[in-house]
Image (tube, coloured by chain):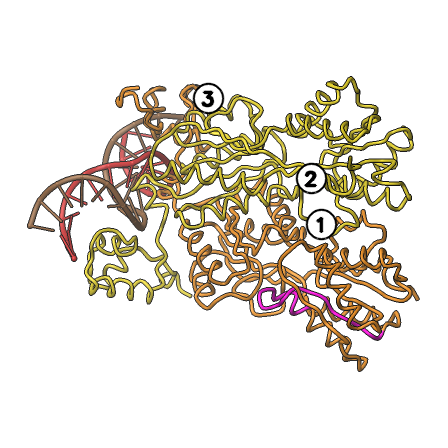
Chain colours: A orange, B yellow, C brown, D red
Amino acid sequence: MAPTDMKRTLTLRDVSEASGVSEMTVSRVLRNRGDVSDATRDKVLEAARRLGYVPNKIAGALASQRVNLVAVVVPSLSNLVFPEVLSGISEELEDTGLQPVFGVTNYSAEKEEAVLYEMLSWRPSGVIIAGLEHSPHARAMMANSGIPIVEIMDVDGEPIDSVVGISHKRAGLEMARAILKAGYRKIGFLGTKMPDDHRARKRLEGFEAGLAEAGVELADREFYSGGSALLKGREMTEAILKRSPELDFLYYSNDMIGAGGLLFCLDAGIDVPGKLGLAGFNGVDLLEGLPRRLATMDSCRREIGRRAAEIIAGHSHTGLIGGERIELTPTLQLGDTIRRA
Amino acid sequence: MAPTDMKRTLTLRDVSEASGVSEMTVSRVLRNRGDVSDATRDKVLEAARRLGYVPNKIAGALASQRVNLVAVVVPSLSNLVFPEVLSGISEELEDTGLQPVFGVTNYSAEKEEAVLYEMLSWRPSGVIIAGLEHSPHARAMMANSGIPIVEIMDVDGEPIDSVVGISHKRAGLEMARAILKAGYRKIGFLGTKMPDDHRARKRLEGFEAGLAEAGVELADREFYSGGSALLKGREMTEAILKRSPELDFLYYSNDMIGAGGLLFCLDAGIDVPGKLGLAGFNGVDLLEGLPRRLATMDSCRREIGRRAAEIIAGHSHTGLIGGERIELTPTLQLGDTIRRA
DNA sequence: CTGAAAGCGCTAACAA
DNA sequence: TTGTTAGCGCTTTCAG
């Protein structure tokens, strides 16, 4: 192919020439804006289709100062929880003309800053970001961006603008109360190493506060990081029970390690929930296939995604900016691993 | 706040004025391009930081005709498999200056077209897209885009440009051989309803071809759609065994339903792998925590993501375009659910 | 209903 | 090493 044959990407002008209609009118047709006669419209659409024209949003965005993108920043995709949030967002954005763009931080504040900077430089219509904890620089970028910011998952803290989530402190607290009410007293905690995971930390704080109401203290704790959660759950459970055989309840910071623990207990022939109670957190569908239903608390992920997207979509219509605060209430599911009264 | 106080987003010009350096030089500093004296560089960086300037990539992209985005199109995020592919891509792209942008199609060809159109209109540096099956329009858009296209996961078909994946036909075939070699003969298949999932379909085709080599036919089959995979695996296994109690092997189209089947069999006291063998597909980490290791075949997801990203990154350096074909070889893991010789 | 002119904020190419 | 001049491809605005 000679250099002169090089395929140049098509522009409005090409469609204009091919259809004999001015660029301006072609633009109007392609965007369904303003009144255009059916005759010209057909000419234009035919030409555009025939040429295989794909508009250049970069130029469009620059000229119109409008970008139909919503930046979505989450710590991880392997956590199972976040893909569900993203689904909720996609669903809600479906017919708004807005498009989500996902960024992943790997629970690193530094990476979060980088991802935010990158995304904000595309001037999106809004930002949805997990958590309320951000570096000062990240906060400043968002606060100064002039676009709606929705922090999600967690409401325990100071939002920059809007926030949609649940109170993890309260979730921990209520789980503690339910466990105490069922008569358990020697309680152990198993979870991720916390520095990274603020929500798990807050649940633990709330949990300990709940125990304290009854003068109970956490009897033991075990932490992990990395690896297959199910397997880790097994191993940690074995370890903590070996170290503290007197425990009568294990509270896990998420359902996957809880499920691993449950499988271990069943294998080991431990009487669940009679001699040992178990509970996790998140309410993931996955649990449904296990031999028993693990006690858990629904984290309202999908709903959180939907509501956050709704806020952004709303702003993009009205142009108004002003923080909303939406706190959802997780529901406790006792399942088969907490004694019933 | 009076309208005149409205925060206008900052431009290069603002930094230029604040630092007393020309726009052009400011631009150079901010992009680390060309030679700039340390003195001016410091002045510029200081001013940019002080003002909180965030560059406008839209304008930059339009002017330079370069966009550091890679469009990544996958059918789903809840499949567990795709998040891993995405991780591989992100990882590989990390230090290339390229940024992945994810789009989800929900296994719908129509949605795929829409997502592609949307993404191509941002003129990305490349496209990574799952599967080889696309609508004619989608194929045309990609073929005419003038950017590198990498189709991933599957190599059984005609790629548009480059392709990185495994042969699902061969994967099914080899699993069939391994099962036959272990002495199983009454074999059932359990999987998703196929119209949407071409790779599962190809595995089944290969599987049946493998059985046919030994004159064996599939004895029964069971399909599902939607719902918790683990639970579905349980239910389908119960159903197929009730209908065809003579079966001595169950081949699942993915590990999650296979795991559900395994849990069912253990609960039901079925002798696995003695009386009944089981196998899945994907090689997900998750399996590690189960009471037994399910036989499976690694689908090389992370590696696929990495290699695909590598191709795009390579093109973006060299500017060359030319299809590569990379076929990876999945490894069979017999686990604990296929009899050993 | 249609068209012409003037940028959007940045960078390529060249000049100093 | 730094600055100047033209656009990138589209949309806004205003005139027909």
User: In the displayed structure, does residue B72 sit left or right of residue B339?
Assistant: left
Q: Residue furthest front?
A: B341
Please identify, in this view, whether the residue under mark 3 or under mark 1 is nearer the observer.
Answer: 1
Q: Position of residue A173 (x, y in %)?
A: 74, 71
User: Mark 2 and mark 1 in contact (Cβ < 8 Å)?
Assistant: no
Q: Position of residue B37 (x, y in %)?
A: 19, 60
User: In the displayed structure, does residue B182 sit left or right of residue B245?
Assistant: left
Could you say which quadrant of the image residue B208 lies in?
top right
Q: Nearer the viewer, residue B335 or A194?
A: B335
Residue with the mark numbered 1: B288
Indicate whether residue A191 is drawn in magenta. Answer: yes
Q: Position of residue A93 (x, y in %)?
A: 58, 44
Residue at image position (63%, 41%) is: B81
How far is disc 1 from disc 2 in space, using C-alphas? Answer: 12 Å
User: Mark 1 and mark 3 in contact (Cβ < 8 Å)?
Assistant: no
Indicate whether residue B166 is drawn in magenta. Answer: no
Please identify, in this view, whether the residue under mark 1 or under mark 2 is nearer the observer.
Answer: 2
Q: What range of the chain is rendered magenta? A: A185-203
User: Mark 2 and mark 3 in contact (Cβ < 8 Å)?
Assistant: no
User: In the displayed structure, does residue A7 sit left or right of residue B289?
Assistant: left
Q: Secondary structure at mark 1?
A: helix
Residue with the mark numbered 3: A38
How far is disc 3 from disc 2 in space, using C-alphas? Answer: 63 Å
Q: Which mark is residue B333?
A: 2
